[in-house]
Structure formats: structure tokens, C-alpha cells
Image: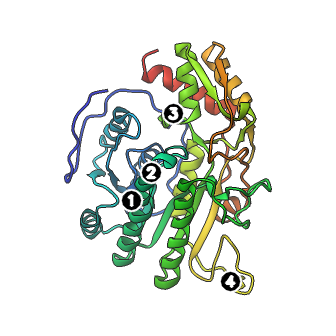
Amino acid sequence: IPRRQLSENHPVFLRSYPHPTCRQHAPTLAIFTSMSILVTGAAGFIGAATAQALLDDGHDVVGLDNVNDYYETSLKEARLINLASSERFRFERANLADGAAMKRIFRDGAFARVAHLGAQAGVRYSIDQPLSYVESNLLGTAHVLEGCRNHGVEHLVYASTSSVYGLHTDLPYSTTASASHPMSFYSATKRSTELMAHSYSHLFRLPTTGLRFFTVYGPWGRPDMALFKFTRAIIEGTPIQVYNQGKHSRDFTYIDDVVRAVVAALARPAVPDPEFNPARPSEDSSSAPWRIYNVGCGEPVPLMRYLELIEQNVGRKAVIEMLPAQPGDVADTFAEVSGLVRDIGVQPKVTVEEGIARFVEWFREYYGI
């Protein structure tokens, strides 16, 4: 992938470098009138895929990202190069915590909707670098909320996480359940963004929708996630570190299903819940235009089964090093997605068997293996 500097403040129109994509698997997402949309975290896994889907549907997209080095920047730059092949795409290299830059971007953008997918991710990294989460997730989200409030944005859709359920063990995780006992600082900041969004929905009637993502995976994914690390280690013949002695299960959610949920949510601004009872307030709706949904496959998969599928697609057995559970990790996740299906009209479709096969095929082509 060619390494080249992208403009900080100007549109980029770069020729797309030939590489495999999974776009042929993506469903048609043209469900609302063409408009200008801001996508934060546009160099990231979910942000880049969402921006591409919106461009394919004919929208004008401004992508915002600081392209930090949390993981290999060459992968982020490759995603941006792919997006920049569209004349409808404009890139802004900026930090969410930079208040002056955020004011300028919102002032100049005239955005109808915002997909706020930029954040500092990672449970374990938040143990060592908590202040980076304050800067990106809390201050950055405050700047996004202020931009939406002051510039007439019709709907803000933002990324939350299944990690907010924390110590809660009643499966499947329901959005009506409490999310008040986070196990990591990362999840605490993401839960905080949900509450921050509610205050803006209540005070300023800004429609906001939070999407709690469950272990997103697929082509162009994050190198710090299990699928990427396991595939690379198996191919290289290096040991895989499996935590909690492999006794985890996860609701793995394929990227196409996540993108479909984000785009569909953008098209359906949150509305007040007419049945909201302030004497017994619900956890996922409000008298304000504020909603919370789980975005998961709705079918937890044991981690060892996940690893077995990677082995089958790579064609080689893994060298496994079993380790204790890591601080901040939950044992199991399982999404209850009836609200997403009912209100947003999205039903997850891609099985883990199909999703892993697509990823391993992409991985081999991307890295020339």
C-alpha cells in the first residue's frame, strides 16, 4: 500500500490502490435522500466501512480522523485511499479533542446527520492509558454534541459498546438492563457518552441514537482484535495467547451487519417514547428523543469454536498458550436485538462461518500471502 501524506484541511482525491474489498457482500443501503454526513473515525474499521456505504448510496461524506498510531497507520491510510477514490468524499485530519478544529469542521460542513464512530478503543489499553480515553471519548464526544447542537444536525448516531454491561451477567444482554457497573475505564467512558447524549437530547431536543456494538469483525478489521491476531499468528506459526483458559464466548458481529445498522439508524431519527414513565424510567428510551440499541448477531460463539474456524480457513493448527483472565474482560457476551429489528428494521444476516472465511480470504490477499 503506498504511504502518502493526506491533507490536514483540504479534500483528498487519490487514485484508489488496487486491493481486495468485501464490498460485493454489502447489501444496498440507499434508504434516505442524499445529504451531507459527517463520519468521525473515518480511518477506522467501522468508520471507513460506514463512510463507504454512505458514498455508495450517493451521500456527500466528510471523514474525520487523527490517524493515530494505536495500531498500524498503513492500514488506516489504505482505508482512506479507498474512500478518496470518490469525489463525494472529503477528509479532515483532526483530533476530536481539538475544540477549534471541531468548531470549524461543523461550521463549514452543514451536516444533516452525524455518525460519531471515532473513539479511543480497547479495554486493556485503557488500564495503562486512561487519560487518552478522557480526551478522545469524553471531550471528543462533547465537541461532537456541541457541533450538532449549534449547527442544526437532524440526528446523531454514535458508537457505544457491549462492554457497558460490565458486571451484569444476566444473558442475553438487554438494553432495558442496568449498565451502571463497568469493568474497565474504556466501558465507563462509553457509558458516559450515552448519558452525555441523553442530556443534549433532553435539553436541546437533539435526536441521538446509541448503538452498542458486540465484537465487530471482518475484512479491514482492527489488528488488535482476536481474529486479526489469531489469523496472523497461525500463518506465522507463533503462539496464540488465549485468556481465561479459552472459557470465553462472544457475540461476534460481522462488519456488513454493523454498517447496515448504522446507516439504517441514521435514516430514522430518535423520537420520544410515548410510554416513558418517569416513576420507572427505562434504560434505553426517554421522554427525550434518545434511544439505545444493541447491535449483535444474537448468537454467542465459544472462543475455542471461533479459533477452530480460523484454523480450518487458514489450513493450519494454532500453537496455543492458555492464560488467566485479563482485568476488565467479561466472560461472555450475548446481544438481545429485538429493539434493533423492531425500530431500525435490521436483522443480522452473516454467520460466523461465512464471516471468518471472508476475513481470511481478505487477509491473504491484502498481505500477499
Tell me where residue 124 sits by quadrant.
Answer: top right
Q: Earlier in the sequence, mark 2 or mark 1?
A: 2
Q: Earlier in the sequence, mark 4 or mark 2?
A: 2
> Residue 343: x, y in percent?
66, 66
Q: Residues within 10 Å of mark 2 (few under 14, many from 20)?
A: many
Q: Which residue is mark 2?
A: 120
Seen at 52% across and 22% down, the residue is 232
Q: Say which mark, if any, is on residue 274.
A: 4
Q: Residues within 10 Å of mark 4 (few under 14, many from 20)?
A: few
Q: Is residue 210 visible?
A: yes
- Secondary structure, mark 1, is helix
Q: Residues within 10 Å of mark 3 (few under 14, many from 20)?
A: many
Pick the front one: 304 or 202? 304
* Label 3 – label 2 distance at C-alpha: 20 Å
Three-letter amino acid code of the residue under disc 4: Pro
In this image, 94 relative to 267: left or right? left
**Discs 1/4, front:** 1
Q: Earlier in the sequence, mark 1 or mark 4?
A: 1
> Residue 74: x, y in percent?
34, 32
Seen at 37% across and 38% down, the residue is 76
Q: Which residue is mark 1?
A: 135
Q: Residues within 10 Å of mark 1 (few under 14, many from 20)?
A: some
Q: Is residue 273 above or below residue 349?
A: below
Pick the front one: 334 or 360? 334
Q: Which residue is mark 3?
A: 219
- Secondary structure, mark 4, is loop
